[in-house]
Amino acid sequence: EVQLVESGGGLVRPGGSLRLSCAASGFSLSASEMNWVRQAPGKGLEWISYISSDDTVYYIDSVKGRFTISRDNAKNSLYLEMNSLRAEDTATYYCARDGFDVLTAYSFHAFDVWGQGTTVTVSS
Amino acid sequence: DIQMTQSPSSLSASVGDRVTITCRASQAIYNSLAWYQQTPGKAPKLLVYAASRLRSGVPSRFSGSGSGTDYTLTITSLQPEDFATYYCQQYYTMPPLTFGGGTKVEIK
């Protein structure tokens, strides 16, 4: 079964750091393009970061310079290192895989597999 | 950045109703659009990609259409399990990938 499981969320003070993990099973992370998406309490979805199979990375402006996306192919895991955390970073964080249509070999930057989410609360 | 505007932000409907949700992009996105369904406390689920391609396993009462800047998700004959929040997302350009604000479909 294709699955993503996030961990590492918790309560952290403003200015603090946290490292989120996303363990993949049922597929190879090394061959996949992966993302982090977050959702503040009661709010909509916000894409925050992407990593390609050749380790090209992108970030939304609000986290650039503070967050770092990475992967460990040997552990089949994705990570999000978050530094200088702010109250506005409070959210549920999801890892998500880029989509791929097997029949047509069409790949696309929308998300066909999601983890269950891990909650980050930034508060003093 | 491409802005995605969804309407309505919420709607009330009954089981069996036909429901239409609209998403407008701030520039043409050439069918690079996906639709998701999210129920409370759960991760979103991909329903439609490339504006009109139904993901395998998604019921055929869901359909997507549109072109240019304007796109629509239609649910024919709303079922109890369809009461949820729906989001559109453009993937024509990145970064950033952007979502619409969501449409909450509630029971009338």
Image (cartoon, grey):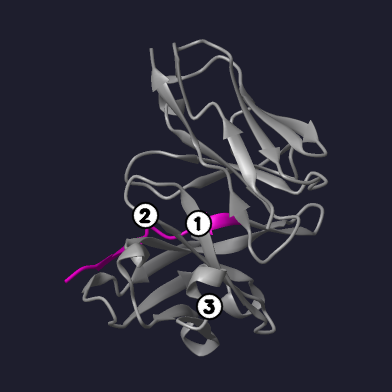
- In this view, the residue in front, A40 or A30, is A40
Same chain assignment for discs 1 and 3:
yes
Q: Position of residue A72 (x, y in %)?
A: 50, 87
As helix, strand or loop, the secondary structure at mark 1 comes to strand
Chain bearing tag 1 is: A
Chain bearing tag 3 is: A
Q: Position of residue B58 (x, y in %)?
A: 59, 36
Residue B56 visible in rendering = no
Find the distance from the CA under tag 2 to the CA under tag 1: 8 Å
Residue drawn at x 37%, y 68% is A6
Find the distance from the CA under tag 1 to the CA under tag 3: 14 Å
Could you classify mark 3 by the number of other residues whose Cα lies within 10 Å: few (under 14), some (14-19), or many (20 or more)?
few
Name above or below for residue A46 compared with residue A7: above
Mark drawn on residue A100: none
Q: Which residues are magenta?
A: A111-124
Chain bearing tag 2 is: A
Residue receiving disc 3: A64
Residue drawn at x 29%, y 81% is A15
Could you classify mark 2 by the number of other residues whose Cα lies within 10 Å: few (under 14), some (14-19), or many (20 or more)?
some
Q: Position of residue A105 (x, y in %)?
A: 80, 59
As helix, strand or loop, the secondary structure at mark 3 comes to loop
The numbered mark, 1 or 3, whose residue comes first in the sequence reads 1
Name above or below for residue B104 compared with residue A17: above
Name above or below for residue A25 compared with residue A109: below
Same chain assignment for discs 3 and 2:
yes
The rendered magenta stretch, by its main secondary structure, is classed as: strand
